[in-house]
Amino acid sequence: MPKLFCRLGIVTVSRKPVTRWGRRGFAPHSVLPDVPATPAGERLSPPGDVELYYAGDFQLMLYSGEAAHYRDNLLAKPTLWVAMRPDDPKGVVMLTADPYEGEARAGDEALVVAGLPMPPSVAQWVEGFMALHYKEEVFVKRKRKRADPDALTRGAKRVLDKDEFLP
């Protein structure tokens, strides 16, 4: 199965807790098309109620078998899904362009999942990959076999040939 990958930078956001008993949590904020030279986990904004952190660079991998999913993503608003652990500014677990995989990860209570806008350069790259590998599936309706009316009767007994006996 052909696959292609690129590296993208992820920025996370941390907000001040609502109550004094709460903890500061992290959530995906944006995707950078170019990987900066900033070390992972470094704060990008001054300390305050809302702080931005650079989570690091992560691999976006495209699989040819999921080209139809990428097509569905590009037909709507192009989105990248990022899943991360809420207690770690570098805790990114998944980066994907497959909307169905992103939706599936949203059910995990231990992760924060966000759909972030796809940068235009990444959208062009995904569109080029999809154009190479997307094949329209033709719908073929199956036809049922007609039932054998003799096989449906209970009373008729069939005589077995000598080749049909079990050993």
Image: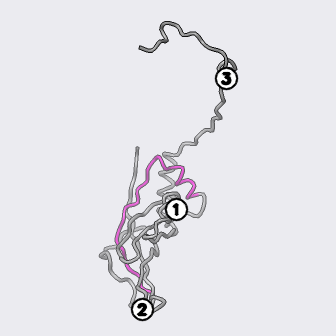
N-term mark: 1 or 3: 1
Q: Distance between the residues labelled 1 and 2?
A: 32 Å
Q: Circle 1 is placed at which residue position?
A: 103
Q: Which residue is drawn at 60% across and 61% down?
A: 76
Q: Which residue is drawn at 63% across and 38% down?
A: 139
N-term mark: 1 or 2: 2
Vertical position of residue 31 compared to residue 163: above or below: below
Vertical position of residue 40 compared to residue 132: above or below: below
Q: Give the range drawn in magenta.
A: 50-74
Q: Residues within 10 Å of mark 1 (few under 14, many from 20)?
A: some
Quadrant where the N terminus is found in the figure: top left
Q: Residue at x 45, y 47 (%)?
A: 64
Viewer-proximal residue among 123 and 103: 103
Q: Is residue 70 magenta?
A: yes
Which element carries disc 1, helix, strand or loop?
Answer: helix
Viewer-proximal residue among 27 and 160: 160
Which element carries disc 2, helix, strand or loop?
Answer: loop
Viewer-proximal residue among 146 and 8: 146
Vertical position of residue 113 compared to residue 133: above or below: below
- Say which mark, if any, is on residue 152: 3
Quadrant where the C terminus is found in the figure: top left
Q: Is label 1 in contact with label 2 (beta carbons under 8 Å)?
A: no
Q: Circle 2 is placed at which residue position?
A: 48
Q: Is residue 159 magenta?
A: no
Which element carries disc 3, helix, strand or loop?
Answer: helix
Q: Distance between the residues labelled 1 and 3?
A: 47 Å
N-term mark: 3 or 2: 2
Q: What residue type is labelled 3?
A: Leu
Viewer-proximal residue among 22 and 147: 147
Residue furthest to the top: 162
Q: Residues within 10 Å of mark 3 (few under 14, many from 20)?
A: few
Q: Residue at x 66, y 21 (%)?
A: 154
